[in-house]
Image (cartoon, grey):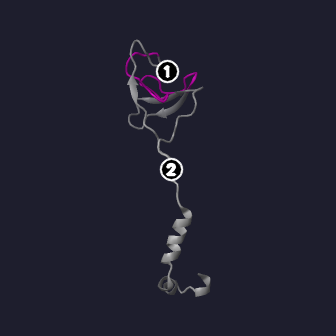
Amino acid sequence: MSHTRREKLTPVTPESPCPVCAGDHKCSVGDGGLILCGRRDGPVPGFDHRGPSPGDARFHIYRRADAPPPNRSNKPNPSRDWGGIARDYAARFDADARAELRTPRAAA
């Protein structure tokens, strides 16, 4: 299972305008490359349009076309001791469990 990291968004300003529409308000830029634009709603040269924001369809999601893919995981998947898990299940599969399933002893 992967976990999507939530980016920290910073509002655009006159000193740091929106890279998509060049606006100085209504848009935000994420620390991982995400751009929420409140003025554009479709393809823009140099950017990948990812569609409307699930939280507010008035904003559209963009990333620079040449940007590396975002880091999708912020939590490593825990390693599993599959041998230990198998031994645990085998230990619980006793004579009563085999009898309940009518499994011959040789099959265990």
- Which structural element holds mark 2? loop
Which residue is located at x 40 percent, y 30 percent?
8
- Which structural element holds mark 1? loop
Magenta-colored stretch includes residue 46: yes
Magenta-colored stretch includes residue 15: no
Q: Is residue 105 above or below residue 84?
A: below
- Percent across and percent down for residue 10 are 39, 24
Residue 100 visible in the picture: yes
Going from N to C along the chain, the mark reached first, 1 or 2, is 1
Which residue is located at x 48 percent, y 85 percent?
100
Residue 104 visible in the picture: no
How far apart in space, not on screen, are marks 1 and 2 (Cα)?
35 Å
Taking the image as shown, residue 26 lies to the left or right of residue 42, namely: left
Q: Which quarter of the rendering shows the C terminus?
A: bottom right
Of the residues shown, which amino acid type is indicated by label 1? Val
Which residue is outermost to the right?
106
Which residue is outermost to the top?
15
Dot 2 crowding, Cα within 10 Å, few <14, some 14–19, many 20+ = few
Q: Is residue 77 above or below residue 95?
A: above
Dot 1 crowding, Cα within 10 Å, few <14, some 14–19, many 20+ = many
What is the span of residues highlighted in magenta in the rendered image? 22-47
Q: How many numbered discs sit on the rendered protein? A: 2
- Percent across and percent down for residue 34 are 48, 29
Which residue is located at x 52 percent, y 37 percent?
71
- Percent across and percent down for residue 7 are 43, 33
- Kindly report the secondary structure that dominates the magenta region of the rendered protein: loop
User: Which residue is the site of mark 1?
Assistant: 20
**Along the line of sight, which residue is nearer the eye, 24 or 94?**
94
**Along the line of sight, which residue is nearer the eye, 3 or 12?**
3
- Percent across and percent down for residue 12 are 40, 19
User: Which residue is the site of mark 2?
Assistant: 77
